Amino acid sequence: MDILVRICKVLWTGFWAGLALLLVFIPIVVAASLSSTGNLAFTISRAWAWIMLKVTGVRPEIRGREKIRPGQSYVIISNHQSHFDILALVIRLGIQFRWIIKKELRAIPLFGFALYKSKNIFIDLTDRDKAVQSIREGIRHLPPGVSVLFFAEGTRSPDGAIQPFKKGGFTTAVEGGLPILPVTVNGSRKVLPKGALAFKRGPIEVVVGDTVDTRSCAHATIEELIAVTRSTIIVNFNPDYPEERTS
């Protein structure tokens, strides 16, 4: 019976994901073509995220959004536990931001075009030097007030624990003179853990931490910036969410 329920959930999610994609994909492609900033396409993509959250019964919440300054570009550093992190962040952060995306997605007809025209940043994961250069170029071409988001662990956590952080986002922040915005996502692993197909209804919490001003930390090493940012994310991390933290 449990297997049947899981299969039904997967089919239900797949149906609505496909329908939502069809409903908003063409407008996103058109918007990406017409808008030189990619802002319109990102705004329309929120409709897809909203539909997906509604049909799956997942409720994203946010704490600390008042710490985000309108019009300021950030390097957003977040933990990563589930595909649902993406939906929750798009809906709840309330600001324009772009993703760091593996270059293979650029080759997908129309979809890759829309991602490219929306000013997302494509990188070659097999070549670190090329990836760094692509990020630098992408940051330089971001519209004013638009941020870029890094999942600092590099991939979804397999066990829910926050993994070691990679340096890419922090190097980008220092080189671009951009503040770091630490963001913690709670509860998404209970909704859809890594490797699972069937989701569970429930809340997801997005917690915005205090910004890290890289300009005032000019003499700090990348490792020190990682330590400060990771500490903030861990302080706001609750593996038991939506229950109260037990320790």
Image (spheres, rainbow, N blue to C red):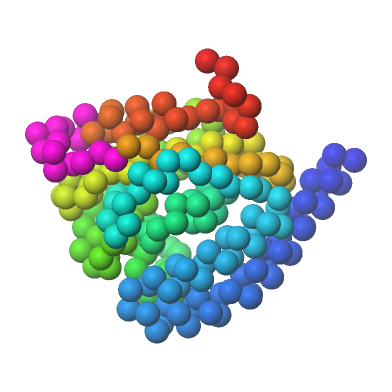
Q: Is residue 59 visible?
A: yes
Q: Quadrant of the N terminus?
A: top right
**148 left or right, relative to 195:** left
Q: In this rendering, is residue 195 above or below 56?
A: above
Q: Position of residue 131 (x, y in %)?
A: 28, 55
Q: Residue at x 63, y 27 (%)?
A: 243
Q: In this rendering, is residue 101 above or below 240?
A: below
Q: Position of residue 21 (x, y in %)?
A: 61, 70
The answer to which quarter of the image holds residue 114 is bottom left
Q: Residue at x 85, y 39 (%)?
A: 2
Q: Residue at x 31, y 52 (%)?
A: 69
Q: Secondary structure of the magenta portion, mostly?
A: loop
The residue stretch that appears in magenta: 211-224
Q: Position of residue 221 (x, y in %)?
A: 16, 32
Q: In this rendering, is residue 111 above or below 230?
A: below
Residue farthest to the right, as pictured = 1
**234 left or right, relative to 23:** left
Q: Position of residue 3 (x, y in %)?
A: 83, 42
**43 left or right, relative to 245:** left
Q: Is residue 219 magenta?
A: yes
- For the residue pair 73 and 142, the one nearer the viewer reads as 73
Q: In this rendering, is residue 55 above or below 179?
A: below
**5 left or right, relative to 172:** right
